[in-house]
Image: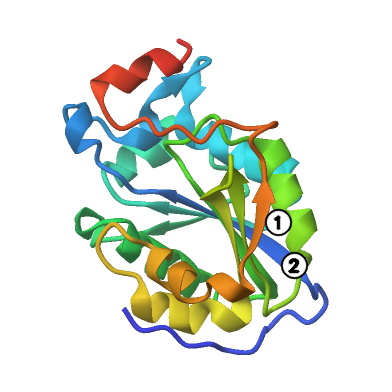
């Protein structure tokens, strides 16, 4: 997939922080159940993540789907979201990050705030805190921190997207880029308002409420 760092085509909305939800995972260690459709409080996980982004102040919200994309579109309410498919989702998170950032290229977004669909403990409070701390600069680089350990959400100013895309491969996403730019990275402690656990295996499902 190619990425072009176009100038914004919607100058009437400068400084927009877009929400970018990576929701393409196939749940290999969950018996092949797509993570986006796992049920939490009666609704699919993908809906909870979209709601957290919106309540945390992100607009627009782009959602990257992969595994069972047609089912997710049918079973989840993604009204108002920009939904994009990642045909290479099985290659890992890096391909979904590339797909999501490519969908934002040429829009009014000056930054993207990235969340993962399988982290329901990361809600609107963490989204808002990281977004507020980072501002809306096209150069900004920030992440949530949990007890001093880096986590999600991840805030990527638009000027950084081309380099992030070039380094996003496998399951690493932006990890390599963040490691290489530690000196510029703002870490925002969120351990008091969020929990950064993943829903990866059957043993993690107890964290979800039916």
Give percent across and percent down for residue 77.
53, 35
The C terminus: image quadrant: top left
Give me the C-alpha separation between circle 2 and circle 1.
Answer: 7 Å
Callout 2: helix, strand or loop?
A: strand
For image coordinates 68% across by 84% down, the residue present is 9
Side of 166 relative to 50 (left or right)? left
At 19% from the left and 32% from the top, the residue drawn is: 29
The one of 80 and 120 positioned closer to us in this rendering: 120
Q: Decide if residue 195 is on the left or right side of residue 140.
A: left
From what the image shows, is residue 131 above or below residue 185?
Answer: above
Q: Are marks 2 and 1 in contact (CB under 8 Å)?
A: yes
Quadrant of the image containing the N terminus: bottom left
Which numbered dot is residue 16?
2
Between residues 195 and 106, which one lies in front from this camera angle? 195
Identify the residue position indicated by label 1 in the image. 59
Figure quadrant of residue 173: bottom left
Dot 1: within a 10 Å radius of its alpha carbon, few (fewer than 14), some, or many (20 or more) residues? some
**Residue shown at 34% from the left, 21% from the top:** 204
Q: Does label 2 or label 1 sit earlier along the sequence? A: 2
* Position of residue 149 measured from the top left corner of the image (x, y, whole percent): 52, 47
Identified at 24% across, 41% down, the residue is 26
Q: Do we see residue 154 in this rendering?
A: yes
From where the camera sits, is residue 106 visible?
A: no
Q: Residue furthest top?
A: 210
Residue 177 is situated, as x and y percent measured from the top left of the image, at 44, 73
The front one of 202 and 143 is 143
> Is residue 10 found left or right of 187 in the rendered image?
right
Question: Where does residue 90 sit, x and y in percent of width and height?
Answer: 20, 54
Q: Secondary structure at mark 1?
A: loop
Left or right of 184? Residue 72 is: left
Numbered tag placed on residue 174 in the rendering:
none
């Amino acid at each position: 997939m190619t990425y072009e760092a176009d100038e914004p085509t919607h100058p009437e909305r400068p400084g927009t922080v877009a929400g970018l939800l990576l929701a393409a995972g196939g749940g290999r260690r969950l018996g092949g159940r797509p993570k986006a459709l796992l049920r939490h409080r009666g609704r699919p996980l993908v809906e909870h993540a979209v709601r957290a982004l919106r309540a945390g102040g992100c607009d627009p919200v782009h959602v990257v789907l992969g595994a069972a994309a047609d089912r997710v579109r049918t079973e989840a309410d993604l009204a108002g979201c920009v939904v994009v498919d990642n045909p290479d989702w099985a290659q890992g998170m890096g391909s979904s990050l590339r797909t999501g950032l490519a969908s934002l290229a040429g829009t009014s977004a000056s930054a993207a705030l990235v969340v993962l669909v399988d982290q329901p403990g990361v809600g609107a409070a963490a989204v808002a805190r990281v977004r507020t701390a980072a501002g809306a600069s096209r150069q900004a680089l920030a992440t949530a921190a949990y007890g001093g350990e880096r986590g999600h959400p991840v805030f990527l100013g638009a000027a950084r997207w081309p380099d992030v895309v070039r380094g996003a491969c496998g399951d690493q996403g932006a990890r390599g880029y963040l490691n290489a730019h530690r000196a510029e990275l703002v870490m925002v402690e969120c351990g008091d308002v969020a929990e950064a656990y993943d829903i990866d295996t059957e043993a993690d499902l107890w964290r979800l409420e039916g």
